[in-house]
Amino acid sequence: GENVEQHPSTLSVQEGDSAVIKCTYSDSASNYFPWYKQELGKRPQLIIDIRSNVGEKKDQRIAVTLNKTAKHFSLHITETQPEDSAVYFCAVDIGAGSYQLTFGKGTKLSVIP
Amino acid sequence: SQTIHQWPATLVQPVGSPLSLECTVEGTSNPNLYWYRQAAGRGLQLLFYSIGIDQISSEVPQNLSASRPQDRQFILSSKKLLLSDSGFYLCAWSVMTGTQYFGPGTRLTVL
């Protein structure tokens, strides 16, 4: 099955700095790569996603880059703010039209004011 | 627009008691539905997924079961809870785009 590795598991940055979280996956048939943000005690919420026909996607301070050849994708958050503090999960579809996502183990981001 | 509901929001149950958690989706037809469990400080573990009424796949062997009696209703059950069943239970839905949207969750504590 699909194997998703997410690094780092924890990340602390100063407010205003950038944060980068990376995920690698194993199944070359995967085509869909979402990122979720989960605040303490709340549900995971989709913040950005990318499909395999696109190399980069940006939404204000958040961007995702995808390297299909190397089978990795990354979340970039610029000008971090305290409200960016949360756990971030990457996910990968299992491929071949599957309805399932495999999630990384999560990265706890702390933005220090 | 689509919305997803889960209840109850919190639940405290003794070991050996039964369990029933309910999830309903509004504003879409024939959604794919999912049950996940999240232990404290941990990742998301897929328990069950369903692509249609009475079409349910189990991802892990356990003392839990799922049912989908209606198109937009997904139920998670257990006949006898274990301590290890404690966690945050999340229901999610998706359509053909693959994006999954999560419900507000049920926090279950088994004592």
Image (tube, coloured by chain):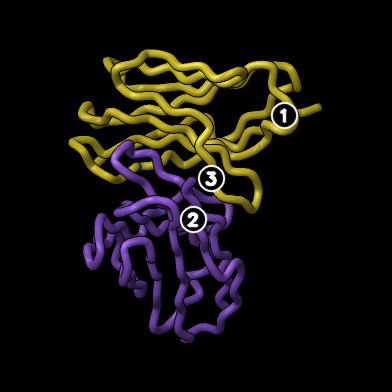
SS class, disc 1: strand
Q: Amino acid at mark 2?
A: Ile
Where does label 2 land, which residue? B4
Q: Residue at x 50, y 37 (%)?
A: A46
Mark 2 burial class by Cα count in 10 Å: few <14, some 14-19, many 20+ = some
Q: Residue at x 81, y 27 (%)?
A: A113
C-alpha distance separating marks 2 and 1: 31 Å
Q: Amino acid at mark 3?
A: Pro
Q: Residue B58: percent from the left, percent from the top?
A: 27, 62
SS class, disc 2: strand
Q: Nearer the observer, disc 2 or disc 1?
A: 2
The yellow chain is A
Examine the image and state in which quarter residue A82 appears. top right
Q: Nearer the observer, disc 1 or disc 3?
A: 3
Q: Residue B94: percent from the left, percent from the top?
A: 36, 46
Q: Nearer the observer, disc 3 or disc 2?
A: 2
- In the image, residue B48 sits, relative to residue B76, either above or below, namely above
